[in-house]
Amino acid sequence: MAETKTIQEILVSLGEKPINLNIEIPGMKGENGQDGRNGADGLSAYDIAQLEGFTGTRKQWLDSLKGGAIADEARTMLLNGNVWCKSNSIADVLAAVISNLGKAFPRTEFKPLTVPTVLQGQRVVTVEGEPRYFVKVVGMETPFEIGDNGTGSISIEPMGVDDVHLTYHNFTGEKVGETVIAGSHEDTRTPDETYEENGVKYALFGRKLEVNVVNFNGDFEHNFILLGKWPKTSIDSVLIKASRPTTLETGALDGRRYTFTDVAGNHIGNIPVLVDNPKNVTFDNNDRYEYPIKLGSIEYGTADVAFDSSRVEWSDSQHKYVNTGSSIDHL
């Protein structure tokens, strides 16, 4: 968590100029002083504002005062100290400071993220956690905020067999936890062999390999490997499964095995590679390869696709995968 300051330091930061307070002390009364001489009229606040560079009209200047004073630095200190502050207005900052008086600062405790049981086909899930913290669904960009009452709703793809991974973030965006909504595993088939690498789950049924890529967590140093641990002689076809948008890093880096070679380093050749939801799978590529891949969808079949650009993705108009990235020259 970022460096924080004490509540006293936050109060000091509310302004560089001193705050003048009128305080009446009961029972104390001073003597009358001598009358002073009449002084010359001083500059108005608007005149002073003009001398300081304000160029608007008197009305514009008055309107500018209605927004109230702000305290950006104090609000940042509070958020970094795990104390919620609605805005940078003085009123909100003081309210946040007062709410934390007598408590530890920085505040270290927070409510953990809890998720109820999710049913197959469910799209909206109610979660509980720290008010104003937020949740992200891995594979989706939109964050979901937890409300003041400690509950929030997140949207997911209709719940199926795939696990859904969630990350939990504090006021400043720092990840403070993660959890998994387990998929509803209703597939009664039993694969002959299974394997997992970089979040990808492989299941071999006879000579048909099914590759669930939805939780791929690799990168170009830990690139996607199509055939997993198997030689090409054990595989007749490959089905890539993705229930939500997924990007796979393909190619090879620093001596890594190339995506489209088998465990012995042989190119996969004419093995057809089908994708069940082709719009959900995009390939980010870093290594041009001399052999095309027979890649496509269940609906439209395969086409020869050359991985010679930095991105390969599905084209709805052409019904096939096409190169859409920048050119890669090296082989």
Image (tube, rainbow, N blue to C red):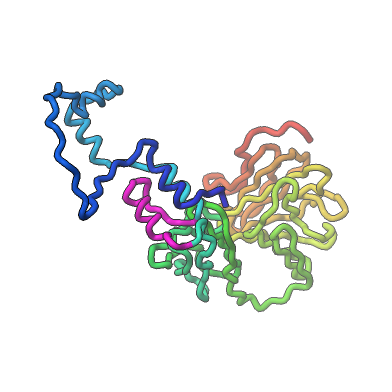
> Residue 175 versus residue 2: which sits nearer the camera?
2
Quadrant hosting residue 200 = bottom right
Q: Is residue 29 magenta?
A: no
User: What is the x, y in percent for residue 254?
Assistant: 81, 42
Q: Residue furthest right?
A: 264
Give the residue displayed 76% in from the left and 68% down from the top. Answer: 194
> Residue 247 versus residue 24: which sits nearer the camera?
24
- Where's the C terminus, which quadrant? top right
Give the residue displayed 70% in from the left and 37% down from the top. Answer: 308
Q: Is residue 102 magenta?
A: yes
Q: Residue furthest bottom?
A: 188
Task: Classify 104 as above or below 329.
Answer: below
> Residue 323 versus residue 163: which sits nearer the camera?
163
Task: Classify 182 as above or below 63.
Answer: below
Quadrant hosting residue 240 = bottom right
> Residue 147 versus residue 198: which sits nearer the camera?
147
Residue 194 left/right relative to 66: right
User: What is the x, y in percent for residue 305?
Assistant: 68, 44
User: What is the x, y in percent for residue 124?
Assistant: 45, 67
Q: Which residues are magenta?
A: 82-103
User: What is the x, y in percent for residue 154?
Assistant: 46, 63
Task: Classify 154 as above or below 93.
Answer: below
Residue 125 appears in view = yes
Residue 119 appears in view = no
Give the residue displayed 42% in from the left and 42% down from the top. Answer: 13
Q: Residue furthest front?
A: 31
Residue 58 left/right relative to 272: left
Number of marks in the image? Answer: 0
